[in-house]
Image (cartoon, rainbow, N blue to C red):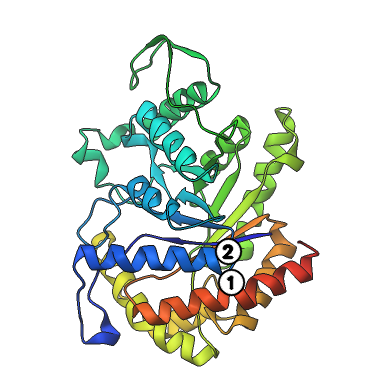
């Protein structure tokens, strides 16, 4: 199984450090150190989310990933996600092709519709077109990915491409393209129809209830003629790791509660309580908050349900002290990943 991390590059007051708020430059410096360490401890990939809000600093994630490419050697570099609905597929392709060249073949696109909506008014799109924007732009991006001179008739939300080759060409052929979904059946079926790898975000509830989505994905892919054995599934979840379970949860809760309550207030959710947090961190919950062994056990339990090929842990939800995040990355790479690979018979 591929084991890695993803981040939204949060930049909010740190509740464990007197509410200290870093400058954006300081946060990006720490973020690059975190990605570099993830590479050094053997993690397989790092994903960076695209957001256009004051509480995140990654409005241009490919730029940050390009900086990371220069200081890493083997870790794969991805977005998590590229909000394709409000992007230009041509520019997405050019940016990631360039990243692929800079990283010597380590770039990945992870495309999604996005759970935040700020990019739509920012770039002049109508939320009523939320789904059709993504579908049309995904189809165009796939056409570009085929290579050669691109002939595209255009659609309601894309302009024609009159037989023009688009440069630069990446090292990887094809450049990996994942579809990230949050549990919408239509999105799962779309990924299966196009024969694209699926990244399923499980950030709440009972994870086993997501098993039908993986079955839908594999079943749909098989029906339309794709080789299911060549279509990986990934699971991504919130989490934090420390030497002991209690330490991990005590460290993670204040920031997690602040972040989820702040976002929840915007969306009409009640504030996050410690009891809810503890339930999510329990054996049947969606969070991976605990000691290395707890995280190992939960990944392996979920692998029995999903038979997934990739697991991504979000470090962190809300702002935590940089040193604590670095320690969590170290434990994830040097303790959790080797144990999972040994249990699954992976190299």
Q: State whether residue 90 is above or below residue 56.
A: above
Which residue is located at x 72 percent, y 57 percent?
307
User: Label 1: which residue?
Assistant: 333
Does residue 187 appear to the left or right of 225 in the view shown?
left
Which residue is located at x 65 percent, y 82 percent?
293
User: Label 2: which residue?
Assistant: 43
Q: Name the quarter where the C terminus is drawn.
A: bottom right
Does residue 218 appear to the left or right of 265 in the view shown?
right
**Residue 205 on image: x %, y %:** 52, 67
Q: Is residue 240 visible?
A: no
Q: What distance separates the C-alpha of mark 1 from that of mark 2? A: 6 Å
Which residue is located at x 69 percent, y 58 percent?
306
**Residue 110 on image: x %, y %:** 48, 44
Q: State whether residue 102 is above or below residue 257.
A: above
First of labels 1, 2 by sequence position = 2
Quadrant in the rendering for residue 112: top left
Does residue 239 appear to the left or right of 194 in the view shown?
left
Q: State whether residue 218 is above or below residue 28.
A: above
Q: State whether residue 151 is above or below residue 210.
A: above
Q: Badge 2: how crowded within 10 Å, few (<14), some, or many (20+)?
A: many
**Residue 97 on image: x %, y %:** 45, 34
Total number of numbered labels?
2
Q: Is residue 291 visible?
A: yes
The answer to which of 25 and 233 lies nearer the viewer is 25
**Residue 279 on image: x %, y %:** 51, 80
């Amino acid at each position: 199984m591929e084991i890695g991390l993803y981040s939204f590059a949060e930049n909010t007051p740190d509740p464990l450090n007197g509410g200290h708020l870093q400058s954006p430059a300081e946060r990006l410096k720490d973020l690059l150190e975190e990605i570099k360490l993830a590479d050094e401890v053997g993690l397989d990939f790092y994903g960076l989310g695209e957001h256009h809000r004051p509480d995140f600093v990654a409005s241009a994630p490919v730029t940050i990933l390009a900086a990371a490419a220069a200081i890493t050697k083997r870790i794969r570099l991805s977005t998590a996600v590229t909000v394709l609905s409000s992007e230009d597929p041509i520019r997405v392709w050019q940016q990631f092709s360039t990243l692929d060249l800079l990283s010597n073949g380590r770039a990945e696109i992870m495309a999604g519709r996005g759970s935040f909506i700020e990019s739509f008014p920012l770039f002049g799109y109508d939320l009523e077109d939320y789904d059709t924007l993504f579908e049309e732009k995904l189809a165009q991006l796939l056409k570009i990915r085929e290579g050669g001179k691109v002939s595209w008739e255009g659609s309601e939300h894309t302009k024609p491409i009159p037989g023009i080759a688009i440069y630069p060409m990446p090292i990887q052929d094809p450049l990996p393209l994942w579809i990230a979904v949050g549990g919408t059946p239509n999105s799962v079926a779309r990924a299966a129809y196009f024969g694209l790898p699926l990244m399923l975000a499980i950030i709440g509830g009972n994870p086993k209830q997501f098993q039908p989505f993986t079955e839908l994905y594999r079943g749909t892919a098989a029906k339309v003629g794709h080789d299911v054995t060549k279509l990986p599934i990934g699971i991504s979840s919130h989490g934090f790791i420390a030497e002991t379970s209690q330490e991990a949860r005590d460290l993670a809760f204040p920031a997690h509660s602040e972040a989820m309550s702040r976002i929840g207030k915007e969306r009409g959710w009640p504030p996050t309580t410690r009891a809810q947090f503890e339930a999510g961190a329990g054996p049947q919950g969606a969070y991976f908050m605990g000691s290395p062994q707890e995280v190992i056990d939960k990944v392996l339990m979920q692998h029995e349900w999903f038979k997934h090929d990739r697991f991504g842990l979000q470090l962190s939800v809300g702002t935590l002290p940089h040193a604590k995040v670095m320690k969590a990355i170290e434990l994830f790479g040097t303790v959790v990943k080797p144990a999972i690979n040994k249990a699954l018979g992976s190299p």
